[in-house]
Each structure stands twice: as C-alpha cells, then as structure tokens.
Amino acid sequence: MPENESILYRGANYELGHGPGFYGIWPAGSPRPPSIEWWPDTPDGWQGAWARYNTLETPGSITMVSQPKRVAGRLGAGRLGTRALLAAGLLAVGIICGLAGLFPAYLSGASLTSSASQLIPHVFYLAGWTASLALILLGGSRLKVGVLFSLGLSVVTFGFFFSDLGEVIAAGTHLMGAGLVLSLIGWVACAAGSVVALPLQAGFFRRSVAQIRATFSPAPAAQFAPAGPQPTTQPAPQNAAPWTPDPAAPATAPATPNPEAPGAPASPAQWTAPSGSYGQPAPAAPYGAYPGYGAYQPRPASRWQNPGTRRAIFTVAIAALAALGAAITFAPSWDSYTLRTATGVAHTLTAGNAFSNPAAVIVGDVAVMVALVLVAVAATLWRPLRLGAALLAGAVIPMIAQAISALAQLGEAVSPAQFGISNAEANQLGLTISQGVTPVFWFYCIFVVILAALCGWLFRTPRQTAPAVAPSPVSTYG
C-alpha cells in the first residue's frame, strides 16, 4: 500500500480507506489495484463512501482497521493548518492596511473619508475580507467558504483598485496619496491570503473535472450499482440454425422449400435443432420464433434527459446572462445632472461613462466586467455548490457597493466647477444643479439582485437536494 493511503475499514470482499484528498473503496486481497470508486475528502464524501461500502460489503464482516479522521476540509481538521494560518495572517495584514488607508490623502489630496460615495465601497471591501478572516479562523467546513468568499472579492476588486491607480498613471504621481498606497498593499495581502489557502494540487483539479463531467453526463449515475464488473457489449445476434426433419412428427402440410434451410419441410412442427437430444425444440430467440432480429440495442441517452444536467445548464445560463447584463450596464453613464437658470432654461448632462476615462482607467473598468462574468460562471460549475455560492457572493459584494455608492452620491453637493462654470457665474445666472440617476443604473441594480438571489439558491441547493442514499462516486476504476 502506498504511504499516503490508509485502510480504515476491512470486510470480506472490500476495503474502505483514505488517500490524498479522497476516500476510496478497494477490493480486498493482494496485489492491490487502484480504488474502484472514490469520493472527495469532505464530510459529504465520507458519508457517500461509507453508505456505498455498506451496500457492497457482506453484513457483519466489517471491522475497523484505523480510526477515520474528523473531516473538516482540506486545510482544517479540528484545528487550522499551516496554510490556513498563513492565509489568516495575510488577510489580517491586508485589513489593517486597508483601514489605515481610509484616512490619509487618497487621490488629488482628498481622503476617502471626505466623501461618502468614495468611502462606502472600501468599507464593503474591508467588511467582506473581515468576514472571510472570521470564517477561516473558525475552521472546519467554514474555512473553504471563507477562502472562496475572499477570492471572489479579491478578483473583482482588482479592477477597481487598478482604475484608481490608472488615474495616477494617466495624470502623474503627484495625485497619489498615502491612502492609495496603503489600500493597494492591503489588496495585495488579502489577495495573497485568498490564493495561498486554495487546494492547488493536481488531484484537486482532477476531482473537480470529474465532478463537472458527472454533472453533465447523459444520465445520472446509479446510486447502488452491482459490485461486479458490468458487461460493456451487447450479446451477439442469434442466427437461425439449420433444421432437420423429425420422423416422429406428423406431416400436416406439404413440404415447401425454406429460404434458410433449402429442401427442408416448412411446418414448424417438423423442425428440430441439431444440438442436444434428437427432437428437442431449438433455443428461444430474443423475440420468439424470429431469431434473425438479434439483440435489442437501446437508444443512446441524451444529456438533456439527466435532471442534474438540465439544472446545471439552467444555472450556468442564468449566472452568465445576469453577470453579462451587470457588466454591460456597469459601463454607461449613471449620473444625471439638470442645470436650471433663473430664467427657467434647463440643460441635462450625464456623467460616469467608463469609456470616457483615460486608457489606464478603462483597463481597470474592463477588468471588473470580465472578472465578474468569469467568476459567475466558475461559481455555478464549482462543486459542492455551496462553495460556488461563497465564490459568487464575494464577487457580488463590490458590485452592490458600487450601487449604494451611486445612491449616496445623490445626497452630496455638486460644484458648478465640474461643468466649467465658476461660482461667480453660477450666482449671476441663478444656477441650480439637481442630480439623479439614469435608467441604466436601475437595470444594473436588477442584474445585481439576480446574482445575489442566485448566491442564495446555490447555497441552499445542497441542503435541499441532499440524497437520503449514498451520493454517486466521483470516479470509478474500470
């Protein structure tokens, strides 16, 4: 047995053991082949392996060989592992730097605390990373939830921080303040903490790909398949055997040529098989007296016939469309301004189009849109789905923050200098400025709400559809 595998239970015919990142069932005896079935190293995987093992093994023959470990995720088993502690430390450093970056000058000499619309997104980011840190410190099954939540948040916020840095790249380093430097350091630390705790081994990716393939298989896998090997080919068609006349059978019809046995009588009662005892009837064919039809060939199953496949395709489509809609509506102008003079002349302007900014800022905004779509699709393909829900929730948090920031901006005063009008000219004209949001903003909010609702649905799906029987194995060895 390899050093990284151990047997937990042994029976008359099979053994249940633990390997690097999986639970497996092996046939008992030596030499020992690879595991015939295996499940992921998770609490659900252990329940599935144990239930399946009890259906295969002879009752009463199961004995414990070694104590199974308490499963609590890849990085935690009742206590935090080294990588989990490193991830928690990096997140803590990032949060501290992010908090410190709220107060000094951020861009153009203004701090984030000087404007509610600028402060709110960063508060949401820091709150999300703080929640991730708390989940990681709790360990157990919450550890992976915290890691993936932080990962989704870090991936999407990269574009926002790059947009802020893009203004410095476009206009000069004199715009950069200490607050921006500290915030960038905080993002790097939090992103590193999210990545360092991920299970990046080759076995993890193989199991993930196997789970995705099982989800999109033509038919759901059998929960309790027979233990032995199954036939892979259909029996060969049975051809008509030559017949010989039976002298004891009375002649009830005149003899006519038979196309399958030329020169033989045509009456079925006068035919006997050449094998076996003389005079015995021929073996029955699959369809009675018509052996030429051969074996029945079932029609291949369609992937759409699998309920799990239909549900997965529907989920991926909804996530992709909602994320794409949010990304598209994120780019146009959200801010609407109405300028009125004392004489009643009104003029409406819009601002905030992502593609009207400098090139470096546009790159950051495009990075946000692309990251949101990719994370949404990856989250719906992640297994188990509750971890995918955590990944998607992390990506949705900064998008919600942008919407709340836009609403908070409505309560802030608007300077005429934003439109190239001095204060003296504004007073002379009796200029008043009111602001609102464009219809595109409300469409953006609808798409973000759909993504948030999808997070809740993904998180609840494993609990609602938890099978009462053993889950199917991730893979089988043939």
Image (cartoon, rainbow, N blue to C red):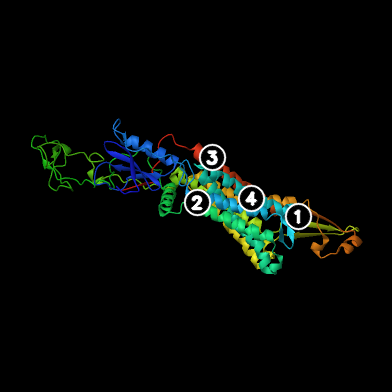
3D distance between C-alphas at marks 2 and 4: 19 Å
Q: CA distance from mark 4 to mark 1?
A: 18 Å
The residue carrying mark 1 is: 114
Image coordinates of residue 135 in percent, x first then y, are: 55, 44
| Residue 458, horizontal then vertical, whole percent | 54, 43
- The residue lying toward the viewer, choosing from 411 and 468, is 411
Measure the alpha-carbon separation of dots 3 and 4.
26 Å
Q: Measure how far apart labels 3 and 1 are at the Cα level.
A: 40 Å
Which amino acid type is marked by label 4?
Leu
Q: Quadrant of residue 298?
A: top left
Mark number displayed over residue 460: 3
Type of the residue with mark 1? Ser
Report crowding for label 1: few under 14, some 14 to 19, many 20 or more residues within 10 A (C-alpha): few
Q: Secondary structure at mark 4?
A: helix
Q: Find disc 4 in the rendering and name its residue.
A: 126
Amino acid type, callout 3: Arg
User: Viewed as shown, does residue 333 lie left or right of 57?
Assistant: right
Give left or right: position of 350 versus 269.
right
